Image (tube, helix red, strand yellow):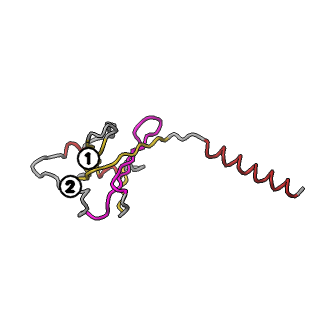
């Protein structure tokens, strides 16, 4: 009898956990590999690999870290998988972005911006348009 009760409790726990993890989220995340990050006074210019292995770029304003909730998060670490970027969508619309970068600015993944090119206007955006 005791074994049957323990079995029923374990089975009930498994069913409850399965149902809790099976719920669908409103969020969808797309993660892409970053090749180069260019720091700018107004944010980061990011060169990344598209699905067809072509390069594309996007701009992430620093001001997005100050919105509520934040539209941008920057994670710095020595993880060898860095740099990469995760773009979060909620109900099919852009929600926020998380850029994972190497901690050391001397890492080869950082580029030096060309001072002759003014990119300020490219940081004046409300949403992220990404080519996959």
Q: What whole-number distance in Å separates the C-alpha atoms at marks 1 and 2?
A: 10 Å
**Image point (78%, 53%), residue name:** 9
Q: Residue sitting at 32 percent across and 38 percent down?
A: 130
User: Answer yes or no: do the residues labelled 1 and 2 have beta carbons within 8 Å?
Assistant: yes
Residue at the spot of label 2: 111
Instruction: Identify residue for label 1.
Output: 47
Location of residue 112 in the rendering, given as x and y in whole percent from the top left corner: 17, 55
Q: Main secondary structure of the magenta part?
A: strand
Relative horizontal placement of residue 132, taking residue 69 as reference (left or right): left
- Position in image of residue 107 (x %, y %): 26, 62
Q: Secondary structure at mark 1?
A: strand
Location of residue 25 (image quadrant): top right
Residue at x 37%, y 53% (from the top left corner)? 73
Please provide the residue range marked out in magenta: 81-105
Q: Residues within 10 Å of mark 2 (few under 14, many from 20)?
A: some
**Residue 95 magenta-drawn?**
yes
Q: Residue at x 76, y 49 (%)?
A: 11
Q: Position of residue 20 (x, y in %)?
A: 64, 46
Mark 2 secondary-structure assignment: loop
């Amino acid at each position: 009898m005791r074994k049957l009760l323990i079995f029923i409790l374990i089975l009930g726990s498994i069913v409850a956990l399965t149902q809790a993890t099976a719920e669908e989220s409103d969020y969808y995340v797309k993660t892409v590999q970053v090749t180069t990050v260019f720091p700018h006074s107004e944010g980061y210019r990011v060169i990344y690999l598209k699905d067809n292995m072509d390069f594309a770029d996007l701009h992430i304003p620093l001001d997005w870290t100050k919105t509520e909730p934040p539209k941008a998060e920057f994670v710095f670490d020595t993880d060898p998988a860095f740099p990469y970027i995760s773009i979060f969508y909620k109900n099919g619309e852009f929600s926020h972005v998380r850029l994972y970068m190497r901690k050391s600015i001397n890492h080869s993944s950082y580029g030096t911006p060309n001072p002759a090119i003014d990119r300020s206007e490219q940081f004046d955006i409300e949403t992220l348009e990404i080519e996959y």
